[in-house]
Amino acid sequence: MPATTLDATTALVLIDLQKGITTLPTVHPAAEVVARGARLAAAFRAHGLPVVLVNVTGGAPGRTEAGGHGGTPPADWAELVPELDAQPGDLRVTKQRWGAFHDTDLDAELRRRGVTQVVFAGIATSIGVESSARAAHEHGYHVTVAVDAVTDLDADAHHNSVRRIFPRLGETDTTEAVIDLLG
């Protein structure tokens, strides 16, 4: 369903647009996803709305053979890409799991700001973005995903999230449509 409205207090949540992830081979060029995320962030800031910049520095405990990549990542792996133009007023969330809500203070910070709707963008569509969007839905937020501002390492997983999962969680639309809804 296309995006129809944005609540008065909507937050933008950008997932894992960090140096170590944006260099991975993705379905759609990561540079384009980053540029769209940066445009969304600038628009939200211009309207005085919260911008949440999420990065990941770890993984879930337990058996990791299936999802582990091995080795030690470079020192700057978890740093947000400079194109996001992070501002002092942006909320920063560092996560250890796929989703931005699990074991973080994201929900409390959004509620403290009166947020009722969340717009998502980032990498990877079927992992960090989908996990976070599902949790937002379960926490009672209205969910919107800017589908041209997400990408994945796997085409089938990306398309499944965009076509089957996100429409069940809320609304989906383009970066331009979301910016237009900001007024």
Image (spheres, helix red, strand yellow):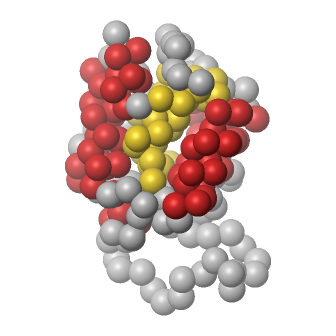
Image side of residue 3 versus residue 25, left or right: right
Image side of residue 141 versus residue 180, left or right: right
Asked if 157 appears above or below 150 in the picture, the reply is below
Residue at position x 35%, y 63% from top?
22
Quadrant in which residue 84 is drawn: top left
Residue 56 position within the rendered picture, expressed as x and y whole percent measured from the top left: 50, 61
Asked if 176 appears above or below 65 in the picture, the reply is above
Residue at position x 42%, y 81% from top?
73
User: Considering the image in quadrants, where does the C terminus appear?
Assistant: top left
Quadrant in which residue 107 is drawn: top right
Residue 1 position within the rendered picture, expressed as x and y whole percent measured from the top left: 59, 24
Q: Between 72 and 180, which is closer to the camera in this rendering?
A: 180
Query: Can residue 55 be seen?
Result: no
Quadrant in which residue 17 is drawn: bottom left
Residue at position x 63%, y 38% from top?
166
Residue at position x 76%, y 35% from top?
138
Asked if 90 appears above or below 1 in the picture, the reply is below
Q: Between 99 and 96, which is closer to the camera in this rendering?
A: 99
Image side of residue 72 versus residue 37, left or right: right
Image side of residue 42 versus residue 178, left or right: left
Residue 126 position within the rendered picture, expressed as x and y whole percent measured from the top left: 60, 55
